[in-house]
Amino acid sequence: MPRYQHRNRSRKSLYNFRTTTWLIITNVLIFYILFYLAPESSRYILLQGKQIIQGEALWTLLTSMFMHQGLLHLFVNMFSLFFLGNFCEQLIGKKRFIWLYLLAGLFAGIFFVLGTIIGSGIPWGPRVFGDINAMAAGASGALFGLLGLLAMLVPRYRVYLIVGPIIVFVLLAIIDTLPQSPAIFIINILLNIILFAMIFSLFMPSKNLRKFSIPVALPMWFAPVVAIVPLIVISFAIDLPIGNSAHLGGLLFGLAYGTYLRLKYPQKMLLLKRFFR
């Protein structure tokens, strides 16, 4: 009997995992399988604007949000999902959360394709909106949906935007556009070391060490603006490996759903306003 109860408790704790935890596990498993075990299959998962326009591989509008283009890409998105996802899930519940996540990711994929159509007729369009032949992947569109929801439900809540890694990402993108040389190779290695040091400094117990990642406190309503607008502006001059239009699409869906919840549950919004000042 004790053994049976122990198994029952273990099984119950497994089933009681947050949806956010299951999403992270799913993303990691899919990445490992497709990136390492069956890389040739990734073309059936990644999103390409040209394919969608031709009516092909429509499922990639959804599947691409579960694939990432490298360990760093996966880590950054899953790190963000852990915090944003758990917060959202506690606010709106498991069912609403999973639908928000999936639909925001789907909406982000649609916006990415629309962006490639718009960008194909503009000289700087592919840099800002995405190349119609480029392969896109990642959960960031869905993450911006979560960010949009939080911006509507808890706009005054203080959140930390980690600026340091973003700056290094941009510098790495600039380095990639320069002619390769031994000096550029060394700078690239140094920037990658700094990037990983900034990320791991976030887990340090010392506040001074965590400052190395340059965290900036912002109200939740302003966080999406800071996360999107500077990268769009930079994209006019530099070809960043970032889906601006996908981020915008996910954000708009999150803002729309957050607005719907605000209007439908005014009493609960008053409680949130009192609690998250």
Image (cartoon, helix red, strand yellow):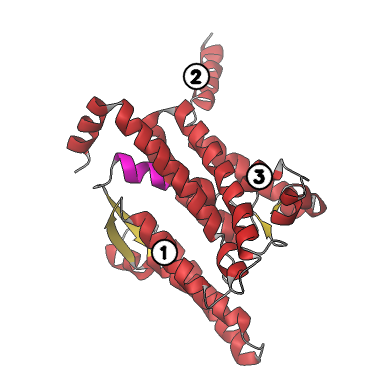
Name the quarter where the C terminus is drawn: top left
> Is residue 133 in view?
yes
Label 2 or label 3, whichever lies nearer to me, is 3
Q: Residue furthest right?
A: 40
Q: Which residue lies furthest to the top in this view?
A: 1
- The first of marks 2 and 3 along the sequence is 2
Residue 232 magenta-highlighted: no
Instruction: Identify whether 177 is placed above or below 240.
Output: below
Q: Is mark 3 on a helix, strand or loop?
A: helix
Label ID, residue 229: 1
- The first of marks 1 and 2 along the sequence is 2
- The first of marks 1 and 3 along the sequence is 3
Residue at which label 3 appears: 61
Q: Are marks 2 and 3 in contact (CB under 8 Å)?
A: no
The residue type indicated by label 2 comes to Arg
Q: Viewed as shown, does residue 102 lie left or right of 35? A: left
Q: Which residue is drawn at 32% across and 26% down?
A: 264
Residue 152 magenta-highlighted: yes
Residue at which label 2 appears: 9
The residue type indicated by label 3 comes to Leu
The stretch in magenta equals: 147-153
Q: Which residue is drawn at 51% across and 57% down?
A: 76
Q: Position of residue 144 (x, y in %)?
A: 46, 49
Q: Residue furthest front?
A: 121
Q: Position of residue 273 (x, y in %)?
A: 21, 37
Label ID, residue 183: none
Gap in angstroms between the C-alphas marked 1 and 2 = 48 Å
